[in-house]
Image (tube, rainbow, N blue to C red):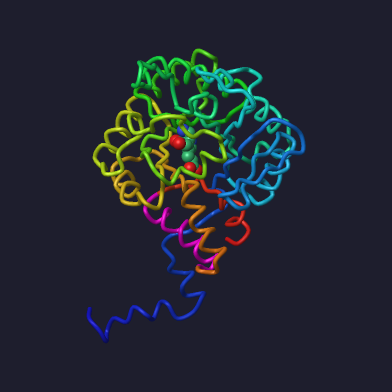
Amino acid sequence: MEFPATRLRRLRSTPAMRSLVRETHLHPGALVYPLFLCEGEGVRREISSMPGVFNLSIDEAVKEVEACAALGIGGLLLFGVPDKKDELGSCAYAADGIVQRGLRAIKATKVSQSLVTIADVCLCEYTSHGHCGVVAQDGEHFQVENDASVALLEKTAASLAEAGADVVAPSDMMDGRVAAIRRALDEAGKPNTPILSYASKFASAFYGPFREAADSAPQFGDRRTYQMDGANLREAMREIEQDIAEGCDMLLMKPAMPYLDVIREARQRFDLPMGAYQVSGEYSMLHAAFQRGWLEPERAMLESLLSIRRAGADFIVTYFAKDAARVI
Ligand code: PBG
């Protein structure tokens, strides 16, 4: 039908009409809030490039968890900022590691049942060199060794599940880690702990502010030999296929806004539940514009989140989770 029989503006006439025909929705229950756990007591250290985001000691993190639960937020993604780092990232898989202790404290709260606790599985916050795996150095050259790294990631995942993580989320991009982690979880008596795989993770400049938050910038080289080249959509599909074959339960796509086409393609091809990570740089650049008065904070935030849902993500990991939950 052509104009004047069809007038698409008829269904935009009032807020109620627009609400009735809205195709995509945001729910607090489909938002995941990242937390950065650090040592100490009463510590709330703001990340300079991420206004409103903090390194939190466990006691402070517990308060945050209670606030998130009250807002109806669906889950938490936990990262550790340890005091000690070494070549093999041993604090990542220590029974008394910072995230392991944080998980026990969160699990002891009354609200813990209402939030899914997701533990990020990676070594970069725990290694002295800042890489996501074991580094072999040969003069000028270095290599991040796949299989040796996977052995440590397995231990990390099992240790986090034992400490109470509801879900483990490997973000390292080593090959074969999902199968190895599945086996390690089963052997640790955790056959019901799901794996949320960062199946499609690109080597991105948008992780910059996170590396300040988690103190995890590589001390030499970069992550391009393990994270994907931003030019490759088909390769992302192969990564996802592989992780599904290895037994992952859910997918995480990352970053979100610069890769909406990849999210869309994955949604069309795969039926697993899928989240997308609106990463630190996406948050920081929006905040930088808010600070200058160049964008309306609430509208720009909601529009950015809606774009990720519309592309096909079921849930969103976002530093805006609390701000968004207050207004949706
Ligand atoms: C750990 C990890 C990173 C992020 C999530 N997990 C950093 C990286 O790969 O360098 C980035 C999250 C963000 O930027 O918000 N490997």
Task: Please name the residue shown 44% across and 15% down the image.
Answer: 151
Quarter placement of the C terminus: bottom right
Q: Is residue 12 left or right of residue 31?
A: left
**Rendering coords of residue 233 (x, y %):** 26, 43
Magenta stretch, overall SS: helix
Q: Is residue 318 left or right of residue 133?
A: right
Q: Nearer the viewer, residue 48 or 327?
A: 48
Q: Is residue 308 magenta-colored?
A: yes
> Residue furthest toward the bottom?
4
Q: Nearer the viewer, residue 236 or 194?
A: 236
Which of the 4 quarters of the picture holds residue 55?
top right
Span of residues in magenta: 295-312
Task: Please name the residue shown 30% across and 32% down the image.
Answer: 241
**Rendering coords of residue 157 (x, y %):** 51, 22
Quarter placement of the N terminus: bottom left
**Rendering coords of residue 3 (x, y %):** 25, 84
Q: Is residue 197 above or below residue 86?
A: below
Q: Is residue 165 left or right of residue 226?
A: right
Task: Please name the residue shown 26% across and 41% down the image.
Answer: 232
> Residue furthest toward the top?
187
Q: Is residue 223 magenta-colored?
A: no
> Residue furthest toward the right?
42
**Rendering coords of residue 79 (x, y %):** 57, 34
Q: Nearer the viewer, residue 116 or 119?
A: 119
Tag count in the figure? Answer: 0
